[in-house]
Amino acid sequence: MTRGSAPVTNSRRRKRKALNRLIEEPIFEKVGYEEYRNKVRNVYDGARGALLATCSMLSLHMPLGERLFKERKFDLRGARRILDVGSGAGQIAGHLLKYADPRAEITCFDLSHEMLRRARQRLKSARPRFVVADLTRLPFADGAFDCVTCGYVLEHLPDPRVGLAELSRVMTRGARMLLLTTEENLAGAWTSLIWRCRSYDREELARTCDELGLRWRQELWYTKMHKVLRAGGICVEIVKQ
Ligand SMILES: C[S@@+](CC[C@H](N)C(=O)[O-])C[C@H]1O[C@@H](n2cnc3c(N)ncnc32)[C@H](O)[C@@H]1O
């Protein structure tokens, strides 16, 4: 694993957690998963979901995300069966349509039927298959995909293990995943508040992935500035062992 971050001591981690708690609203700790999932779906079905593509442009997530594929920091060559997790407005799916092999099959899934409708409308392509599904219970066969993109979805699971185990199950051995998720820092805490999600400690998440046979191959950064400032959240290429 290429680890670009300085090790975080327990006391620094505790201080950071305490600071985040002041901003975050850890709703997933107060209700059961089903109830939390319904709240998440309502958020994305509603006005915030309608603004998701615009937010992704304004936050530069969409143009900077494109660079990961265009500059082959995450190389799509050779990928034949691609799964895009929690496709939202189709922000990552749009890059897949542009940079993946034209013969590659692309499957997009999301909890929100409404988000998939928006994605379909925005992408204007008959190529992806759109499926309504929950990351914790995927309706796909074992080893169905050789490539996965998962952008800002894992933070919507109270326990990442359940979703990561499902992703590991549907990935072939040697399959690669691009995982983007919210990091436990100040920017992450604000994101959590707005989108009713959680955030992750980089080291803890890497360990959890490892335990599930998902090895972090390299940490990626949108730009050099993101790397220097440790900004932009967790962005990592993972390989299924
Ligand atoms: C912030 S958007 C991410 C969109 C896109 N992947 C990107 O990178 O910008 C999060 C999406 O994940 C979906 N989502 C949240 N929890 C989910 C779950 N348990 N299963 C499937 N999709 C989920 C939401 O409906 C929403 O469309």
Image (cartoon, grey):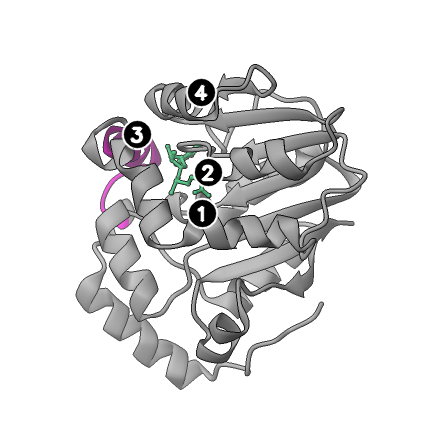
Query: Which amino acid does the dot numbered 2 rest on?
Result: Gln
Magenta range: 29-43
Near mark 1 (Cα within 10 A), the count class, few <14, some 14-19 or many ≥20, is some
Compare marks 3 and 1 and give the one earlier in the sequence. Answer: 3
Query: Which amino acid does the dot numbered 1 rest on?
Result: Met
How far apart marks 4 and 3 lie (CA) works out to 18 Å
Q: Which residue is mark 3?
A: 41
Query: CB under 8 Å between callouts 1 and 4?
Result: no
Secondary structure state at the residue bearing disc 1 = helix
Query: Which amino acid does the dot numbered 4 rest on?
Result: Arg
Instruction: From the viewer's side, name the closer residue of 81 and 100.
Output: 100
Residue 95 falls inside the magenta stretch: no
Direction from residue 168 to residue 31 in the image, left or right: left
Asked if disc 1 is less than 8 Å from ligand 1, the answer is: yes
Residue shown at 45% from the left, 66% from the top: 201
Q: Which residue is mark 2?
A: 91
Direction from residue 188 to residue 72 in the image, left or right: right
Query: CB under 8 Å between callouts 1 and 2?
Result: yes
Ligand 1's image quarter is top left
Q: Which residue is mark 4?
A: 120
How far apart marks 3 and 1 lie (CA) works out to 22 Å
Instruction: From the viewer's side, name the closer residue of 133 and 166.
Output: 133
Direction from residue 216 to residue 85 in the image, left or right: left
Asked if disc 3 is less than 8 Å from ligand 1, the answer is: yes
Near mark 3 (Cα within 10 A), the count class, few <14, some 14-19 or many ≥20, is some
Name the residue furthest top: 126
Compare marks 1 and 2 and give the one earlier in the sequence. Answer: 1
